[in-house]
């Protein structure tokens, strides 16, 4: 689980926004813990007696006696108490008995608490989906299979077998067991979110004026997206070992072959030199208003392995004004573009390497950028994008 750090669910004014009976019902399984820390939870039927200030203090100062399941519940409820989380929870419970039972005046935390108590997996799913927003870089691999096999969403049994294989690797690598794979079918791609633990972490804290330590296993989300049209999967994971694990195990459990994703997708930045400004044309790509070249990295090699970086708000415009062009020599190994998406206030940067990595400001930019890259010839054989 991620570090226990409550940003919202620990202020008296925030706690008062939650229906009192739901808040007490949520905390009541741990009444003994709160009592030991000086907070007595009154009966649900009682109209007063809950000390919100004292409760807030306890939530702000967890210690070694804090029950793990309480810390987990507080963490997840806290994380989804956002405007986006509020709407996502309602989308998940729409048409269910849970939706009928919750009143129309429920505040975000009030809604999250009630849904957690009814079905915690809904809150876990919403929290997992919110993690997409922080994904910014991907590595791409594809299959050589021709023709491409049909792709079907994995069954519960398939996911359980996949999670078991992931658990075995994570356990051996001292990251703990109990991974969870969430599946999100979206237009053009199927996204997979893998929740797992990081290696144990130690954090020094002060308790009762004394220095001590808290040990915990941080939570991590890795993201994969499979494109069934070109047989390519893009992966955002922290280590080479994790990416290799996903390459093999997703190939095995989705297509019956650990080497199904056996070829690196490659990006070629030479169109920048060959086509000049025409390589940035985007009128045929819905969703993009303009593209500018912001930065180039050229590798000259030689005895000193020279690298040259050229940077500007608009490199091609700068070259044009000075009657210059991109240098004829040196390998273009990285390029950063400024992309103005329709509906967005400011341009966002996209960094493309000449290997198989790409970096985005938002994960949702990937599909549009990939269409543009393919049309301009930056993708070798129809592949994808990467990170630094």
Image (cartoon, grey):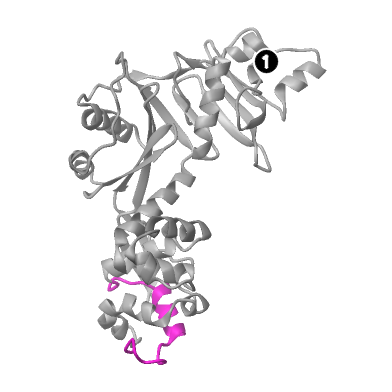
Q: Is residue 147 above or below residue 177?
A: above
Residue 160: image location, x then y, percent: 19, 43
Type of secondary structure dominating the magenta stretch: loop
* Residue identifier under label 1: 278
Residue 265 lies within the magenta run: no
Q: Is residue 43 above or below residue 59?
A: below
Classify residue 57 by image quadrant: bottom left
Question: What range is drawn magenta here?
Answer: 41-66
The residue shown at (27%, 77%) is 30
Q: Quadrant of the N terminus?
A: bottom left
Q: Is residue 303 above or below residue 210?
A: above
Left or right placement of residue 294 versus residue 373 in this view: right
Residue 139: image location, x then y, percent: 41, 29
The residue shown at (45%, 69%) is 109
Res. 83 in view: yes
119 and 48: which is toward the camera = 119
SS at badge 1: helix
Residue 54: image location, x then y, percent: 42, 84
């Amino acid at each position: 689980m991620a570090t226990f750090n409550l940003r919202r669910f620990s202020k008296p004014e925030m706690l008062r926004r939650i229906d009192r009976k739901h808040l007490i019902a949520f905390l009541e399984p741990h009444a003994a813990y709160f009592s030991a820390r000086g907070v007595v939870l009154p009966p649900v039927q009682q109209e007063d007696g809950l000390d919100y200030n004292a409760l807030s203090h306890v939530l702000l100062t967890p210690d070694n006696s804090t029950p793990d399941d309480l810390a987990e519940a507080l963490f997840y409820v806290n994380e989804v108490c956002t405007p986006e989380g509020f709407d996502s929870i309602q989308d998940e419970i729409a048409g269910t008995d849970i939706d009928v039972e919750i009143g129309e005046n429920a505040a975000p935390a009030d809604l999250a608490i009630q849904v957690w108590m009814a079905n915690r997996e809904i809150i876990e799913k919403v929290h997992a989906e919110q993690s997409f927003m922080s994904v910014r870089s991907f590595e791409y691999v594809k299959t050589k299979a021709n023709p491409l096999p049909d792709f079907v969403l994995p069954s519960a049994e398939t996911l359980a077998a996949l999670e078991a294989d992931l658990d075995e690797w994570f356990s051996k690598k001292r990251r703990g067991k109990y991974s969870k794979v969430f599946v999100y079918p979206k237009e053009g791609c199927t996204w997979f979110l893998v929740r797992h633990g990081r290696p144990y972490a130690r954090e020094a804290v002060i308790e009762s004026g004394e220095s001590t330590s808290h040990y915990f296993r941080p939570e991590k989300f890795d993201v994969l997206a499979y494109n069934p049209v070109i047989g390519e999967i893009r992966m955002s994971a922290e280590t080479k070992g994790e990416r290799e694990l996903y390459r093999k195990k997703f190939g095995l459990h989705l297509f019956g072959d650990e080497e199904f994703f056996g070829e690196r997708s490659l990006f070629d930045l030479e169109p920048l030199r060959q086509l000049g400004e025409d390589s940035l044309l985007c009128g045929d790509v819905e969703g993009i208003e303009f593209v500018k070249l912001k930065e180039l990295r050229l590798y000259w090699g030689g005895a000193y392995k020279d690298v040259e970086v050229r940077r500007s708000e608009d490199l091609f415009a700068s070259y044009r004004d000075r009657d210059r062009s991109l240098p004829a020599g040196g390998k273009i190994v990285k390029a950063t573009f400024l992309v103005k998406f329709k509906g967005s206030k400011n341009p966002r940067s996209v960094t493309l390497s000449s290997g198989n990595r790409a970096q985005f400001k938002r994960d949702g930019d990937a599909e549009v950028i990939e269409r543009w890259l393919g049309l301009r010839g930056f993708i070798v054989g129809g592949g994808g994008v990467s990170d630094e």
